[in-house]
Image: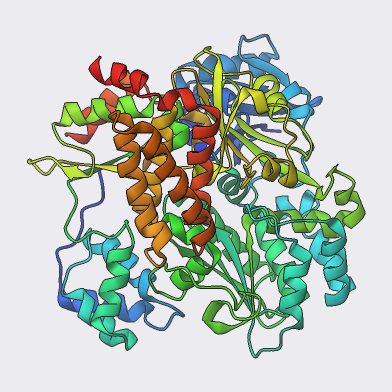
Amino acid sequence: MNLRIFVPRDAGAVAVGADEVALALEQAASKRGVAIDIVRTGSRGLYWLEPMVEVATAQGRVAFGPLTAAEAAAVLDAIVTDGPHPLRLGVTEQIPWLKRQTRLTFARCGVVDPRSIEDYRAHQGYQGLERALELGSDAILAEVTASGLRGRGGAGFPTGIKWKTVAQTRADRKYIVCNADEGDSGTFADRMIMEGDPFVVIEGMTIAAIAVGASKGYIYIRSEYPHAVAAMNAAILSARRAGFLGGSSRSFDLEVRVGAGAYVCGEETSLLESLEGRRGIVRAKPPLPAHKGLFGRPTVINNVLSFAAIPFILAGGAKAYAEFGMGRSRGTMPIQLAGNIRHGGLFETAFGVTLGELVDDIGGGTLTGRPVRAVQVGGPLGAYFPRALFETPFDYEAFAARDGLIGHGGIAVFDDSVDMIRQARFAMEFCAIESCGKCTPCRIGSTRGVETIDKIRAGDRVAENIAVVEDLCNTMKFGSLCALGGFTPYPVMSALRHFREDFDPARTRLEAAE
Amino acid sequence: MTPASEPWDTARGAEIIAEHADLEGATLVILHALQEAFGYVPEPAIPMIASALNLSRAEVHGVFTFYHDFRREPAGRHVLKLCRAEACQAAGGDALVARAEAKLGIGIGNTTADNLTTLEPIYCLGLCATAPSAMLDGRLVGRLDEARIDALVAEAQR
């Protein structure tokens, strides 16, 4: 039997040389006359070890990494002779970083061939759909509600309630929309699951369609993710071919739509406008998308990770999912460790783990080896947390109580060289670039914010201008139409509150003089 | 290198528009397809889209100008996109952007005078655990350092 060697096709692995490694392995194998099958998988999410290749053995898969093309031949020799190699990491599932996770949503990611629906089905794929078809609409809604699943995009709204609203709204057509406009820096879980296990997203959306009675679904993927677009399109085609989408027997079909570089389109109503072919201008709510969404029809709009959690909930039962977590945050969260971090990657775990455990223990501190000074949780609209708040448990309510948010679960780590007034300025600048322009607090407030922070940096009436920034933040937070203007104050205010020394004009002037 | 774009041709443009005009909310799909073919969205295409979709020219122009991706004119032969978002900032991305700007003699967002290289910011490629990252003509590169950015810049000038 041919040796089966697994090499990720994940964009994060490809960006650090996975394609070259796969090619070098092929060449080394043909030179040695060794018969191998290379399976291109998703990533396991241990990015500091990428490109990480695995080989199927009697003990399970054994991993090697991080590999370069130059080392491929020597690794192949070690595989063939079962000999030692400095990059040998042992049985993949036993790597502590992976072993201590609870992988429910990401169970198959990095394991299966994302282009093979047979492989998906061989790994419990479509068991959730099978049970959903037996249960019918009301019982599916009850299961999803009982699981306690909350929207993984950031807002944390209970998924079951959203679905029930759509199910109860009468209309000639209903839509399922998957928000794959993962624009938050520090987050990449949507990209990983679409590239590594695209069928789980399709299955989740199909279950939603059965629950609410929808006939058409769209997956809106950002243009910055060409690999995910290709993976989802390929998966939709093969799901259609296998009779899981389209056709006459099933009335639900799916289509991928590609964004065009507008961050605000991650906001659900802006995304719907964009899908309709218009400028991504935020809509006022009400009406809720559940009542009047895409093309004015009742629409379930959820994040990729919310849909991806559904098949497990249906197959394993709501109780199995809800057993994990704390308080009102049930189940697991795929947390993404990013930025200046030693062990960066995807860590799926039950809610409740503390920020300090995630950054210091699991993440291993900074890559530069300097002390961690600040971590931004939840993307460009998330607060910066100082070490003093590292006891905060990963939980929607605990973060909200500390004027932060968990958002989409991304954590960007900064060392002590970070200048927090610069980060505060960037938050305002980013909001100014990306504002859709509909509401004044966001459109004007962000630009005034940049100007005022520049004045503080220049040492111009610092106390007065800090008061102006605080006032602007309040106006934006309470007066903006959506989360872009409404949450930009989180990074700005947290920088001011926890890192006030960086707003000290003496220090700012000193640096400017350097 | 990016695949060579076709020169603008009215009949070809009309064909691309007709291919997608029946989709629900087709405007973005058509703009993407035109840019894919011609390397940018030529001005004469705007009224053509408007008439195919029964929209006003202003509406189509509004959509075209709202999104960062769509180009009014062709880019340089190579497009080098450097991530400027927080995770890449934390990993030293700003200094690498400055280095690329200095090497190319242009600010980010511009094209070199010889039309070889367009340098653009991008806000997150989702490679945040192997930051800083870049995309050269669709090819992803992570774990950028000075040597890697220099190599990318050299490649983008060929």
Residue closer to the observer: A73 or A450: A450
Q: In which quarter of the image is residue A287?
A: bottom right
Q: Residue at x 27, y 29 (%)?
A: A458
Q: In which quarter of the image is residue A3?
A: top right
Q: In this view of the protein, which residue sits in the foreground, A494 or A358?
A: A494
Residue situated in front as seen by the camera: A354 or A228: A354
Vertical relation: A478 (above or below) A210: above
* Residue for point 70% across, 14% down: A82
A391 and A177: which is toward the camera: A391
Percent position of residue A415, x then y: 50, 20
The residue shown at (56%, 39%) is A383
Q: Position of A132 compared to A308: left or right?
A: right
Q: Quadrant of the N terminus of chain B?
A: top left
Classify A277 as above or below A25.
Answer: below
Residue A106 on image: x %, y % = 71, 44
Estimate the x, y position of residue A361 in percent, counting from the top left: 70, 20
Q: Which colour scheme is used?
A: rainbow
Instruction: Judge from the rendering whether residue A427 lies leftward or rightward of residue A102; answer left or right.
Output: left
> As drawn, which residue projects farthest toward the left?
B113
- Residue A362 seen in this snapshot: yes
Is residue A230 at least partly visible in the picture? no
Identify the residue at horizontal 72%, vertical 69% (top origin).
A162
Residue B93: quarter of image: top left
B6 left or right of A122? left
Question: Residue B24 placed where, x, y %?
Answer: 46, 80
Total marks drawn?
A: 0
User: Where is the C terminus of chain B found, in terms of image quarters?
Assistant: top left
